Amino acid sequence: MSVALIILAAGKGTRMKSDLPKVLHPIAGAPMLHHTLRAGSALEPAHTIVVAGHGSDQVRASAMDFDPSVQVVLQKEQLGTGHAVDQARAALEGFEGDVVVVFGDTPFLQPDTLTRMVEARRTHDVVVLGFDIAELQPRYGRLVMDGDRLIKIVEYKDATEDERAIRFTNSGLMACDAKVLFELLSEVTNDNASGEYYLTAVPELANARGLKVTAVKCDEAETLGVDSRSDLAEADAIFQTRARAQLLDSGVTVMAPDTVYLSFDTVVGRDALIEPNVVFGPDVTVESGATIRAFSHLEGCHVSRGAIVGPYARLRPGAELAEDVRIGNFVEVKNATLATGAKVNHLSYIGDASVGEASNIGAGTITCNYDGVMKHRTEIGARAFIGSNTMLVAPVSVGDEAMTGSGSVITSDVEDGALAIARAPQVEKPGMARKLFEMLRAKKARQSRGS
């Protein structure tokens, strides 16, 4: 059976106190919306539809950045969850299969839970996702069950005392045959205190038709919604705790787990070592046996087996480190490839460049890659030695087994095996230092008397 995924993402999120749409606020380096899209992708949906409202252009751009095939429809007025789902009616015209409705601000939803909802659809017409709350509270609607049959969803304010004591509560997620869902949505009214069309009315309408309605249970943590900055911080902390535990369980040594920040897509191989206070931005892969030393920041990069990075290093997008590469303290690498055994150990910037096998880059070396308008590349061959404080003015190449003298400004290509020195000759003037100091001290004394 084909599946269509509808993600409700139209809320402004006024409690966030932000111009950014709520679902675009990041958790572990990715918008909440992307977390939901990733969970939903496990269903291999034939259609993925995001219902946007506030900041719809931004939501559309973010959704398509995750997957260009995502469709975004606009809910011009926020008239309730039922109304929001109904905005996908035209986009799913003629679709035969199941619709799964989820929320864009529930980043911990698990793919397995969505799969269980779809499996339950094989024997039931409408499937609702619920969870048992640890503490009774008025925030959630209650799921009134009769065996495995869901009779209705009742909001707390409308519930009896017995119903308020029910711990099985509504997450808001639902799975239903597409044709049946949109037929039932046509019967939903806004005859309530809020004047809105609620998706929660669907189960009761389905029961009235004699359809089979049930609820699937998940862990309460999966349904955690994010409505405020405080919720966002809590959600990020939960993600970090889980992700660190997964790293440890997979055979990664993390010396001070609470100080390491991971992104939603961080990949680290077994027997890698992560020292304290390391930050992983999006799109980082660290292979087995690599070492990331303290206070390093990585994003958009690949670190191969046996490489050592840091301490205090920064790897920016496009950094590709082959096996046994060394990146030392206060080194920045951007859009550059370093071949096996290359070393950049101190105080250097390597940007828009390639560094050959076993080459050594001296302290203070800079690839001058930007001319104020365009970026240019620096090519360094294998087993080259770049002297300390060399400025490599791109575009420029240094050949295999070539060398540059310390303090050189290299503006022309250096052939294989050559030594390039580009600096002013040293001039020595005997006794001049003493004379200069005497002149300066006399000047200072005159200034002191004048003041």
Image (tube, rainbow, N blue to C red):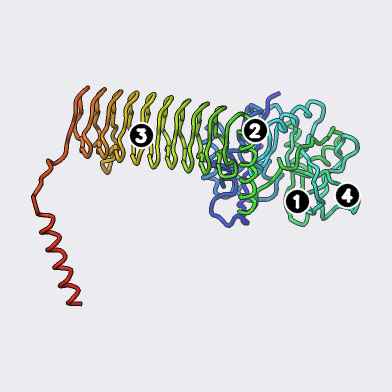
As drawn, is 244 to the left or to the right of 188? left
Find residue 144 and report its image quarter. top right
Q: What's the residue type where badge 2 is placed?
A: Gly
Give the vertical position of 304 relative to 14 (above or below).
Answer: above
Mark 2 or mark 4, which has the lower sequence index? 2
Task: Mark 3 vs mark 2: give the one in front.
Answer: 3
Q: Position of residue 354 (x, y in %)?
A: 33, 28
As drawn, is 285 to the left or to the right of 175? left
For disc 2, the neighbor class at 10 Å (few under 14, some 14 to 19, many from 20) is many
Q: What's the residue type where badge 4 is placed?
A: Glu
Figure quadrant of the C terminus: bottom left
In the rendered image, which residue does mark 2 sit on? 40
Mark 3 or mark 2, which has the lower sequence index? 2
Residue at (57, 47) in percent of width and height: 25
For disc 4, the neighbor class at 10 Å (few under 14, some 14 to 19, many from 20) is some
Mark 3 or mark 4, which has the lower sequence index? 4
Residue at the limit of the structure toward the left, as seen here: 430
In the rendered image, which residue does mark 3 sit on? 344
Secondary structure under tag 3 reads strand
Residue at (27, 37) in percent of width and height: 388
Secondary structure under tag 1 reads loop
Give the vertical position of 412 relative to 278 (above or below).
Answer: above
In the rendered image, which residue does mark 1 sit on? 190
- CA separation in Å, label 1 and label 3: 66 Å
Mark 1 or mark 3, which has the lower sequence index? 1
Q: What's the residue type where badge 3 is placed?
A: Val
Q: Nearer the viewer, residue 65 or 218?
A: 218
For disc 3, the neighbor class at 10 Å (few under 14, some 14 to 19, many from 20) is many
- CA separation in Å, label 4 and label 1: 23 Å
In the rendered image, which residue does mark 4 sit on? 163
